[in-house]
Amino acid sequence: MAEQIAPTRSNLLQRRDQLKLANRGADLLKRKRDALIAEFFSLVKESLAAREALNAATQEAYFSLFLAKAWDGPEAVESLSLAERGSLEVEIQIQNLFGVKVPQVQAPEFSSQLPFSPIGAGARTLDSVTQFRKLTEALIQVAATETRLRKVGEEIKKTSRRVNALEQIVIPGVNSQIRSIRDVLDQRALEEVTVLKRIKAKLEARQEENVEATQE
């Protein structure tokens, strides 16, 4: 059921102010949405590039592991892999992107030290360690990019819903109220003019009668 508004000039001015505010809000939200869409497509490119880098890093890592096992022996490689027990710290910063808080993940910096003594380790095993560290960096980069992509995509949907609500519900509703109030006020003004014309006509008629009576 539509809200009933008293057809007064103060309410008309109030609704006109609301209309300006709603239009301004819709315009700002559309600008925000357009900026987010541009950022979204930029992130799509980054995400695709990160996925390609991940695929390449995966192939390189597992191929190097295959060579390490073939040359140095699977027992030696697996024995050395058990030495890696440390945790990996990932730095996360929160970035404000057009009012949206999105995480920005920094790629980890691996220590130049190996978790095992390189003495006695084969060259291909050492190369495999390097390749798997690159694979770890590629995985983190994919996760970071796709997280940002998802956050921005969700905000685009939310912003679009707000724009639609303003343009399809709020603004038409306020416009309807303005028209309704204006119609009533115009009708009242017309009635007032009509009444004034009748009063004027009666006064003029009386004046004529008085003039005629005086002349007689």
Image: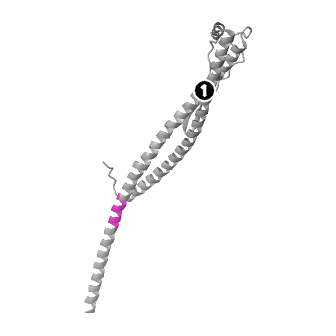
Of residue 106 and residue 7, the one placed in the foreground of this image is: 106
Q: Residues within 10 Å of mark 1 (few under 14, many from 20)?
A: some
Residue 201, horizontal then vertical, whole percent: 29, 79
Answer yes or no: is residue 142 visible: yes
Residue 125 picture location, percent across and down: 69, 14
Residue range corresponding to the magenta coloring: 180-189
Q: In the figure, is residue 25 to the left or right of 128?
A: left
Q: Residue at x 60, y 26 (%)?
A: 55
Residue at the image point whose x is 59% and y is 37% from the top: 45
Q: Is residue 132 visible?
A: no
Q: Reply above or below: 116 against 164.
A: above
Q: Magenta segment, principal secondary structure?
A: helix
In the picture, residue 133 is in which quadrant? top right
For the C terminus, the quadrant is bottom left
Q: Which residue is mark 1?
A: 55
Please state the total of marks drawn on the protein image.
1
Name above or below for residue 76 compared with residue 154: above
Q: Residue at x 62, y 23 (%)?
A: 59
Residue type marked 1: Asn
Q: Can residue 57 be found in the magenta stretch?
A: no
Relative depth, front residue between 163 and 175: 163
Q: Nearer the viewer, residue 127 or 142?
A: 127
Q: Position of residue 193 (x, y in %)?
A: 33, 71
Residue 112: give x, y in percent of width and height. Answer: 72, 18
- Observer-nearest residue: 52 or 71? 71
Relative to 189, say whether 176 is above or below. above
